[in-house]
Every structure is written in structure tokens, then in C-alpha cells.
Image (cartoon, rainbow, N blue to C red):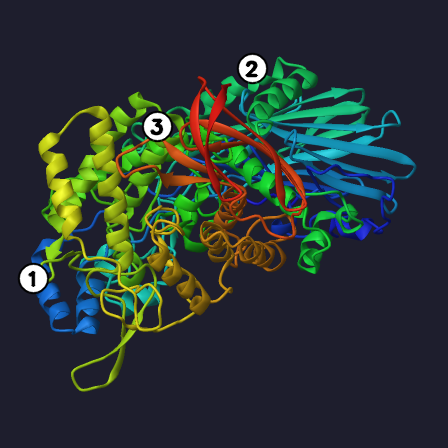
């Protein structure tokens, strides 16, 4: 549905009515993003969210636009993409080809027989528009997003009237609230309308109740592949929605099919006016002559769980939305704002970061600061970037909701880039790297719950597809928690290592919290992942255990075939990342079992297997090998640096404990280079911080901010992906505080806390309060002229903590928190 009714003169964009006059009187604080103009496109709009509802705010003068999302809206339904895969049937053929160094042929068979169907796509909900009557050119325009309160404001002057909008997304009340005011009575005149890109949507206006409703259904099938490409690859059998058994296109063959099987959605808006009157017109509400207007918006879907049909077993979206709307409408705007601010600040205020005094450059609008960041005159802008990452985590991921996907909570496309799904070979994991150290552990709950849900289908796939115990997951999943490989190519889609990586998040949550009950609940998932890899590992013929069919995520290597011809492939055995993840998982599971006092025989098996894993290898160029064989890179500067998993996010390679491997990791980064996508640069911030090279970590942060950040502060791949925002925030944590080095391999909670391990020259003086270290310790640090001045450690109970300060290790008593 696309409603085109507007004020007669509103064919032009809002920018036409804005003359660009600067608001020199506006003085932002250090936690504010601000702009002198409305957003001209989605990538310039400001995001708000309550962990479920999201909006992108454009801030137009003649047309305010909120692009809306509800984070359960995906195409598909449980089991919709299951296809018959029997990896066990072709296992011997493929492993024999790999043993014979026929890698390209092995890859061809993997592509043909071991890959499944495309994943579901995250869907937009729709759009909220406020169409204002044309006026003279606006002046003194300011659009701001206050990170400290999670409130977006728009202010401008037109025809001698000062207009203000305040917009926020409330987690406690499950609504988006908007207040419009003007300093001259009767000046608010506008039309309110809801719209949706989904043709199933219908909108109704009720002037008496001052209410808009919009209901519809998302497509049950969305394919992000071109139909001709699917036919060329002979994969029509995977999509019975589009092709019949003979491979002929069905009469209604499309990439987007509204088949009545998708999620229902219901959106509702109610407004309250002071002065003026409200009427309805063409499914919209028209406000005339008001002094103040408050709009309350909410939405719901029929989603009732990852394993429930959204149509047969779904919840009543309309009833849920109406319940939220009526409850919020009973509260005054001031109460809604106070409840929202109190909830948000409980999380946000835990951490503060000061990276130096303001400069002339720091007074510029945010989009200009981004462009000029590489000049080195505004190093403190990194603190804004850091807090923006925390803001996004709070806004996009709250307990009980869905995890952040590739675009977080915010997406405007029916077929978004990479389906806006969960890419779980780095991207989803990176989204949650800052949750623990940046003191937002509650925001990781959706991810931790998703792991438990994913393991359900993961156990089925391990059993039915692989013929193995335990559970497995590949490089992609969605809200339906499907564990089969997706379609595409083996270099990405065949990667049965996600379960192992996800289990690191389970164990890290325990390490940061010390919560043994959580560990007790997580342990079966960790053990199940171990069981799969115990069955998956094979002897390489030299007494060393490796993964039999392996890819290094999304990368290729070069090799010479039997005839001496140069070939390119991704499939081999024993890739370094596989073994790093397995080492991490086995070690964490072993320690978890020891803490819980369980599974003595299983612990013995893990210990024996750990000792047999292929060791890390250093290649001819002095770098850590990415593959079992020292292959040449097909793309030297590839964005993935998967073989350094052992450096970060794992802690198997450290500067002091494994200096030779640390040197090889450094050489790997030097050869890989400082380029890459936004998220790749963010990962390199963390790598260099772990190598305790603060200046190089800051160089990567500078590259990330100045070259891979959109005007609204979103990270760009390109296009927009949110992972780099979180990777950058986590990297700043790593530069200021590290706690990954254990006192011993068995010790779980006694970590060495290192203060300012990678402080760059660009931050000579500053302070941070509230960062979190493993062992459930919060840390405050102050430094000046590159030297530590003071610090404070706090934990639930007073206890001794091992601290590294200026290279010296000491035992310090943590205060009671």
C-alpha cells in the first residue's frame, strides 16, 4: 500500500523549504549528535528504538518521516526453507578429493549437494508521515539526537514561529511518542498518515477517536536471488514456491510472494491535541490550528515463537497493539518521557568516557566531525562514537526481544542487503562484543536466548544431515532459528562452526558475571557443541586432529593442481579458524565442567582431544597460517581475518604468554593491510588493542570513523551494516581495559586486569568510569599526559584482584559495589 495524498503544494522535498541558515546559538554537549539540515535519505536519518520498535527520523520541515520497524517481522515461517541435504552421503567422496588436493572439485560438490535454500528476509513495517502546510523558508534549524536520554529533537523557525518536535521510543510502555509544540498558539497544521510497502496493508482513520490503524501481512516467501541465477545454478528444486517439480516457473513466480503464510502486523496511532480540531480524510487525520499535539504509536506482529506458525498459532497482533496503545494513552507525555528516561538511563549512565577537552572542531555538526575526524583535531569524538554504540545496543536489543541482525533493528527494504538476517560467522557475534565490557549485559539476553533456540534445529541438522551427535549451526540464521546451510557458495555457506563461536558468548557471560546458575543452564549447550566437533574431527594421517571439510569464512586460496595449473578454491581441511574455535570451546567447556563438578569422563575426553588438535602454524612469510597448508591468498587484503580468532575474541594468543604467535598475528595484520569494510576495520581495532599497539588501534579507529561511517553515525560495509558500530565500541573498551589473561588455564574468575593496555598518543589525558572486567569487577580509570593517575575497582563483595598497572602486576583489594 502506498498512499499519495498530500497537501497540494507538497510535491517538493522538505529541503526546498529550508534555507540552510545556521543555528549558531546551538551548543551541543558531548553526548549529542546534531545536524543543521533534515535528512535527505535514510542513511542520514537518526535511529531510535526500544528494543522492539524502531524508527529512523528524517526531521523534515514540510514533511516529517519516520521509517518504522518491528523486530519480529521476517518473511517465512518455521521450516519453510528445509530441503533434503545428506552431508553424510557424500562425506567420503569429498574428503578423498581433499586428500588428493582436488580442492576445486570438492568445492563443486559441496556447492551442488551440501548447501540449502536462501534465508528469510527482515521486513520493514511501514512509514509514519506528518505533512505540514507549506511555509516560508525555515531558519535556525537543528536536528539532534541526545544519547544521554535517547530523545530526538527537531527545532526550527518559520513565519516567525518557533517549532519543536520531541521523539523517543519507550521500552517500558512499548510505544514511540512524539510531541509537537509551537510558541505561537494555533500554529500546528498538518496531516498524519501511516503507509507500508506491503500491498496487503490497509489503513483506517477515526477522527472521533483521533486514531489511525494499519494492518497487513508480510510475504511468506522472499528470495534475495535473481530467478535466472537460480535456474542457471540448477537450484530450482529448493524453492517449490516458485518452480514446480520439473523446474518450470509457476504462473505467479516472483521473488516476493504474499502467499498468506507470513506474519500479520498491526500498527496503531493515537493523537491528543491542545486547541484546534481533528478531522479525517482519505485514511489520514488532519490537525488544524493546534497549540500542541502528542502522538503515540505502537505496533505488534503475530509472532509467537521461533517454532510456531505465525498464521495458525500466532498471537492476535491487533489486540496486543491496542492494549499497549490504550495503556500508554492514559499517561501524560511528561510521564511517558520520565518513564522512558529513567529506564534508559539506568543502563546508559553506567559508563562515562572523557577523552580530552573540546576543540573548535568538536563544536561542528556531527556529519562534519565525521568527515574531518582523520585530521587529528577532534580525537575526543571517539567518545561520542563509543557512546553511540552503547546507545544502539540499548535501543536495539532488550531482554525478551530479538537479537540485533545485520542492520540492527532498522531496515526499509523488503529484500534488504544479505536479507538483514543473522550472519553468524562474525557479524552477529560482533554486535554483542561490547555488551559485557561496556556494562550492558542485560542487552545480550536476546542473543543468549537465540543460541538456546537455534540449538533445537541444530540438533536435528547434526543428526539427520551429518549423522553426528550434539548440535551444529552454519553461517546464517533468522528469527525461525534454522540451522541448515543457506544457499550461495561454499566459501560462506558451508561453515559448521557457528555453534562453537556462539558458546563463547555463553561462557563469557559467566566469566563477566560469575553467575553459576547461568553456567549450569548453558553447560548442556556447550557440551552439545563439543559432541558435534568430537564426531566431526578426523586424523590427518600424522596423528593430528583436523576438521575434515573446512572453509575460512568467505575467503579463497590459490594452489597448483596436478597439471601445475593455478586454481582457486575455498574448501580444504583443517582451517585455522575451525581449530581455534574448537580449542576455545573445548577449553571453556572443560573449565565449566570443573566449576560445576560434573562429567569427569567427558572432561577426560576433551583433554585428550585438545592435546591432539593440529597446532597453530607460522608460514613462510612469518604470519599465522590461515589454512592447514601454507596456501597463497587469492585476495591478500580480504576483509575477513578469521585465522586471528585466537587473538580476538578468544584469548589463546597474548603478547606475554605466546610472544611468537603474537608476532605472527602482527605480521598477518601487516600483510592484510588496514583497508576493508567497516566491520573489518572495527575488528582490526580490537586486534591491535590486544597486541597492545594503541597508536595502530587508533589508526584503525580513525579509518573506521572517517571512511566507513555514514552521516548518521551508522557503520557502512558499504552498504549500511551495524556490526562495525559495535566492533568499534568494543575496540575502545579493549584499548582502555583488558581482562582476558587468566592466572592459569584452570582458573575461571581470577583474571589479570590490565589498565590502559593500548592507550594511543591521541588520548593523552582522560577518564573512564564503569567499564566491566571479567570476574564481575567494574573499573574507573583516570590518566594524564599518557600516565595512569588513579583507578578504582569494585565488585559485589570486597576481594583481592590481580591488576597490571604500567607494566607492573600487583594485588589490589576491590571495593564493595
Query: As drawn, is 504 to the left or to the right of 725?
Result: left
Q: Which residue is mark 2?
A: 327
Q: Residue at x 14, y 35 (%)?
A: 603
Q: Earlier in the sequence, mark 1 or mark 2?
A: 1
State the SS at label 3.
Answer: loop
Viewer-proximal residue among 345 and 692? 692
| Above/below status of 316 relative to 415 | above
Q: Earlier in the sequence, mark 3 or mark 1?
A: 1
Viewer-proximal residue among 655 and 312? 655
Q: Residue at x 25, y 60 (%)?
A: 575
Confirm or deny contact between disc 1 and disc 2 (CB under 8 A): no
| Above/below status of 159 relative to 90 | above
Query: As drawn, is 309 to the left or to the right of 49?
Result: left
- Measure how far apart labels 2 and 3 are at the Cα level: 22 Å
| Residue 594 image offset from top left, x and y in percent | 21, 29
Viewer-proximal residue among 659 and 178? 659
Amino acid at each position: 500500500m502506498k498512499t499519495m495524498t498530500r497537501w497540494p503544494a507538497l510535491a517538493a522535498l522538505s529541503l526546498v523549504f529550508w534555507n540552510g541558515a545556521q543555528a549558531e546559538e546551538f551548543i551541543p554537549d558531548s553526548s549529542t549528535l546534531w545536524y543543521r539540515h533534515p535528512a535527505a535519505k535514510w542513511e542520514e536519518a537518526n535511529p531510535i528504538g526500544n528494543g522492539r520498535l524502531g524508527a529512523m527520523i528524517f526531521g523534515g520541515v514540510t514533511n516529517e518521516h519516520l521509517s518504522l520497524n518491528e523486530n519480529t517481522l521476517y518473511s517465512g515461517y518455521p521450516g519453510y526453507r528445509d530441503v533434503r541435504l545428506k552431508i553424510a552421503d557424500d562425506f567420503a567422496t569429498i574428503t578423498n578429493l581433499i586428500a588428493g588436493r582436488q580442492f576445486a572439485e570438492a568445492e563443486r560438490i559441496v556447492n551442488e549437494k551440501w548447501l540449502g535454500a536462501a534465508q528469510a528476509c527482515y521486513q520493514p513495517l511501514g512509514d509514519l508521515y506528518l505533512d505540514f502546510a507549506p511555509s516560508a523558508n525555515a531558519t535556525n534549524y537543528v536536528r539532534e539526537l541526545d544519547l544521554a536520554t535517547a530523545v530526538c529533537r527537531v527545532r526550527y523557525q518559520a513565519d516567525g514561529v518557533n517549532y519543536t518536535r520531541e521523539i523517543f521510543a519507550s521500552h517500558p510502555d512499548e510505544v514511540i511518542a512524539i510531541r509537537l509544540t509551537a510558541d505561537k498558539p494555533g500554529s500546528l497544521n498538518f496531516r498524519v498518515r501511516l503507509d507500508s510497502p506491503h500491498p496487503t496493508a490497509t489503513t483506517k482513520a477515526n477522527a472521533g477517536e483521533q486514531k489511525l490503524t494499519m494492518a497487513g501481512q508480510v510475504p511468506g516467501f522472499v528470495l534475495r536471488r535473481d530467478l535466472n541465477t537460480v535456474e542457471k545454478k540448477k537450484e530450482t528444486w529448493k524453492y517449490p514456491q516458485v518452480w514446480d517439480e520439473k523446474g518450470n516457473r509457476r504462473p505467479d513466480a516472483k521473488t516476493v510472494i504474499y502467499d498468506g503464510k507470513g506474519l500479520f502486523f498491526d500498527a496503531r496511532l493515537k493523537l491528543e491535541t491542545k486547541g484546534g480540531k481533528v478531522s479525517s480524510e482519505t485514511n489520514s487525520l488532519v490537525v488544524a490550528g493546534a497549540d500542541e499535539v502528542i502522538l503515540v504509536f505502537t505496533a505488534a506482529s503475530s509472532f509467537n515463537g521461533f517454532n510456531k506458525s505465525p498464521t495458525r498459532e500466532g498471537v492476535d497482533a491487533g489486540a496486543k497493539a491496542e492494549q499497549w496503545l490504550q495503556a500508554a494513552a492514559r499517561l501524560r507525555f511528561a510521564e511517558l518521557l520520565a518513564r522512558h528516561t529513567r529506564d534508559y538511563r539506568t543502563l546508559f549512565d553506567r559508563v562515562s568516557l572523557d577523552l580530552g577537552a573540546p576543540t573548535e572542531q568538536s563544536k561542528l555538526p556531527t556529519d562534519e566531525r565525521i568527515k574531518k575526524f582523520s585530521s587529528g583535531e577532534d580525537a575526543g569524538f571517539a567518545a561520542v562514537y563509543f557512546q553511540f554504540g552503547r546507545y544502539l545496543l540499548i535501543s536495539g536489543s532488550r531482554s525478551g526481544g530479538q537479537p540485533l541482525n545485520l542492520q540492527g533493528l532498522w531496515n526499509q527494504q523488503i529484500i534488504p542487503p544479505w536479507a538483514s538476517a543473522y550472519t553468524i560467522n562474525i557479524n552477529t557475534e560482533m554486535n554483542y562484543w561490547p555488551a559485557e565490557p561496556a556494562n550492558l549485559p542485560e542487552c545480550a539476553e536476546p542473543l543468549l536466548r537465540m543460541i538456546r533456540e537455534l540449538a533445537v534445529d541444530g540438533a536435528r541438522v547434526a543428526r539427520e544431515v551429518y549423522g553426528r551427535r550434539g548440535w551444529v549451526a552454519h553461517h546464517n540464521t533468522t528469527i525461525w532459528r534454522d540451522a541448515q546451510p543457506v544457499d550461495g557458495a561454499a566459501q560462506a555457506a558451508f561453515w559448521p562452526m557457528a555453534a562453537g563461536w556462539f558458546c563463547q558468548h555463553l561462557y563469557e557471560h559467566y566469566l563477566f558475571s560469575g553467575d553459576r546458575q547461568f553456567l549450569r543452564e548453558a553447560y548442556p549447550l556447550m557440551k552439545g557443541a563439543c559432541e558435534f566437533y568430537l564426531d566431526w574431527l578426523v586424523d590427518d594421517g600424522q596423528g593430528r586432529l583436523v576438521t575434515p571439510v573446512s572453509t575460512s569464512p568467505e575467503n579463497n586460496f590459490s594452489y597448483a593442481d596436478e597439471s601445475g595449473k593455478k586454481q582457486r578454491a575455498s574448501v580444504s581441511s583443517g582451517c585455522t579458524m575451525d581449530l581455534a574455535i574448537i580449542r576455545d570451546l573445548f577449553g571453556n567447556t572443560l573449565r565449566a565442567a570443573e566449576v560445576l563438578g560434573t562429567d569427569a569422563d567427558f572432561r577426560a575426553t576433551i583433554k585428550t582431544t585438545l592435546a591432539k588438535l593440529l597446532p597453530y602454524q607460522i608460514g613462510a612469510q612469518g604470519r599465522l597460517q590461515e589454512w592447514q597448508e601454507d596456501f597463497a591468498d587469492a585476495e591478500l587484503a580480504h576483509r575477513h581475518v578469521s585465522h586471528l580468532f585466537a587473538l580476538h575474541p578468544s584469548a589463546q594468543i597474548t603478547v606475554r604468554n605466546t610472544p611468537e604467535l603474537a608476532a605472527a598475528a602482527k605480521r598477518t595484520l601487516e600483510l592484510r593491510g588496514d583497508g576493508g569494510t567497516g566491520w573489518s576495520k572495527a575488528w582490526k581495532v580490537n586486534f591491535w588493542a590486544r597486541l597492545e599497539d594503541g597508536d595502530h588501534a587508533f589508526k584503525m579507529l580513525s579509518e573506521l570513523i572517517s571512511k566507513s561511517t555514514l552521516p548518521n553515525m551508522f557503520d557502512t560495509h558499504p552498504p549500511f551494516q551495524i556490526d562495525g558500530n559495535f566492533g568499534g565500541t568494543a575496540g575502545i573498551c579493549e584499548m582502555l581495559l583488558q581482562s582476558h589473561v587468566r592466572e592459569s588455564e584452570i582458573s575461571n574468575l581470577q583474571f589479570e586486569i590490565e589498565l590502559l593496555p593500548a592507550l594511543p598518543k591521541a588520548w593523552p589525558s582522560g577518564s573512564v568510569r564503569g567499564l566491566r572486567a571479567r570476574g564481575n569487577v567494574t573499573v574507573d580509570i583516570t590518566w594524564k599526559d599518557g600516565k595512569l593517575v588513579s583507578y578504582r575497582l569494585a565488585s559485589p563483595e570486597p576481594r583481592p584482584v590481580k591488576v597490571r598497572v604500567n607494566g607492573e602486576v600487583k594485588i589490589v583489594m576491590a571495593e564493595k559495589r
